[in-house]
Image (cartoon, coloured by chain):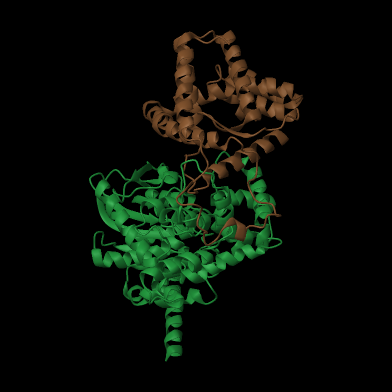
Chain colours: A green, B brown
Amino acid sequence: MAVAERSARSLGRALSSLCIFILAGPALAYEFPFDDPFVATVVGTPEEYRADLDVKVPLKRRSIEIFPDREVPDIFFYDSKLRYSYALQKGPAPLVFMIAGTGGSHDGSTNRDLGRALYKAGFHFISLSSPTHSNFVVSASASNVPGHAFDDAADLYRVMETIWAKLSGKADVTDFFLTGYSLGAFNTAFVMKVDQERQTFNFKRALMVNSPMRLYSSISLLDRMLENIPGGEDNFGQFYQSLVDRFAQVYKRSDELNLSEDFLYKVYEIYQPKDERLAALIGTVFRLAAANMTFASDVMTDYGYIKPSNVKLRKGSDLTSYNHVAMRLGFTDFFHAYFYPYYKAKNPELTRTSLIEKMSLTSIEDFLRSADNIYVTHNEDDLILEPGQIDFFRDVFGERAMIYPNGGHLGNMMQRDYVAHIIELFQR
Amino acid sequence: MILSPALRRLLTVFGILVLGFVAGGCSTAPIVEGDEPEEPVFSADRLIKHDVQQFDEMDDRFMGFNKAVYRFNYRFDNYVLLPLVIGYYKITPAFFRAGVHNFFTNFFNIRTIYNSLLQGSGQKTLQTTGRFAVNTTIGLLGLFDPATKMEIPQHHEDFGQTLGKWGVGTGPYLVLPLLGPSNVRDGIGVGVDWYVTTKIRDAILDPDRTMQIIWGLLYAIDTRAHVKFLYYGTGSPFEYRLVRTLYTEKRRLDIEN
């Protein structure tokens, strides 16, 4: 039965691909030069394959208070408000909310590029940092403990409503759309679930770009990438220093103090490292995100994960040893020694396994299967998926999933045809 | 040093402001509630091997002062400089801003010229002198930049780099009021360059006080507008250290080449 279903589906897929091929030939003209997912992830899309994003965006950077009564610890005096950015068209237009990926800023290169593409195609957009970004953890997370699929979605929805209350007088909006990449794509799925209940925006369509399926799988894969450090994790300091040295040499040639993907691209061009080094590099970028997120959360809750629970930090406190410790701890350490105990304390019946299973798209599978307005783009060789997990997206989203043969994790996101596909999804 | 009385007064007031601000928040020690810190889940003692290299180590004995100045700079940037830059972009046309930027870039080639000389780099001295000559004449006092079209490279050399080339060490890390990341050596370099370039400017242009103020204001705005950095915008609670590392590494490489 299952087999029959599968073959029927693959036949359907083959037929529909054929139809697309006949009706819309250019959609299959997708060309991306890297078949190595590590290279794709680090290097991204080279200039000649990139979408033309040449447009002047009237970007506004703002900050907004989400919890008026919240007292922020001295050390985070600069983070009491949530920072976000937006750009509005002159006349009426559809509006897209964008959610950044792990540790990502509203102002990071991925959201900025996606914003340009959307603005150029005639959309308003509002760009949000990831719930795992330290600014979000401090100012906009109800629990201050990030990474919970349902709680993060509730936080995001509250943020969207608060921002919209402020901007609704300025923007003439015809329809609302939602998108996010990486963890932001995962968030997108759960925010759509909240929207179904609260209906503030009634999102017309949503797009998940390179989403994890089960969070725990993805964070384990990312943590393990640091095993590629020469001499093991004890040598993290040395490895990090060698990275910084290389970054610094590239930084010298650019005028931007920003650890973005463009930056990694420049580093790659110069050094052409092997896959193991690239894996260690990707692991390090995520490790930085983990360290920032974990430490911000720990300071907010006084949980006593890295900072002693009875220590209060001043504005100018020396964070050296906390920084060293934070950089040695991965997302899985966070899960087992902080996240799980934190939620277990609230709900004694919780088990590790049940929490892991809950933080997964499978926990809202029925909703995703029936929600005909949620779309997916993904890559066959995405590094944040375990073998076989890509089939979950094929199976659950069916025709609503566009799976590219290569691109690694987000490597092809700014590829010409990929961007055209995203725009087309929101315009149809 | 010859300063106009008004400028001297302004500098004094500013100095007191910075000192007052800095004196208020120099401590780097945290506050412990109770007798001693509770053991966290992951402590440095438990996790960090002491015989291996840690990252970002350097001489930062003025950390308390530095961090306080870093915060002062953030506020000054947020409430004074950035609003000025935004206003400047609103009221001036693009060609005007380009002209101003070209003008200052060209004028401060003077700094690169004498420092290249002091470093004994004939090539940089010649190229920068050529740049300066072309842009000052054909480029109408530096408002235009024909030298770039003629593919004459733009170098940046300052007295901090010159001292570095001469073998002077960086000394401790130092965050300068308004100017940001530096170190003792580069801080001295900034002072020397400021004095020399101001002398040369006054000798050539003999500006009156209004001109001096306009010069200073435009220079500050133009410089800020071309630095792509927002304080506390990296998303890292450890941003101070991140910036410290990047600055130090960049200067090391600037001196090497």
Look at the image and tell me whether residue A121 can be seen.
no
Which quadrant: the C terminus of chain A? bottom left
B24 versus A287 height, above or below: above
- Front position in the image: A124 or B157: B157
x, y percent for residue B163: 71, 27
x, y percent for residue A369: 35, 76
x, y percent for residue B58: 65, 41
Look at the image and tell me whether residue A183 can be seen.
yes
Q: Is residue B237 left or right of residue A96?
A: right
**Furthest residue toward bottom:** A1
Which quadrant: the N terminus of chain A? bottom left
| Count of picture labels | 0
x, y percent for residue A160: 31, 54
Q: Is residue A24 left or right of residue A372?
A: right
**Residue at image point 67% right, 60% down:** A234
**Furthest residue toward front:** B35
Query: For residue B249, which quarter of the picture?
Result: top right
**Residue at image point 69% right, 25% down:** B127
- Front position in the image: B225 or B145: B225
Query: For residue A251, which quarter of the picture?
Result: top right
A394 versus A282 height, above or below: below
Q: Is residue A345 left or right of residue A266?
A: left
- Front position in the image: B73 or A222: B73
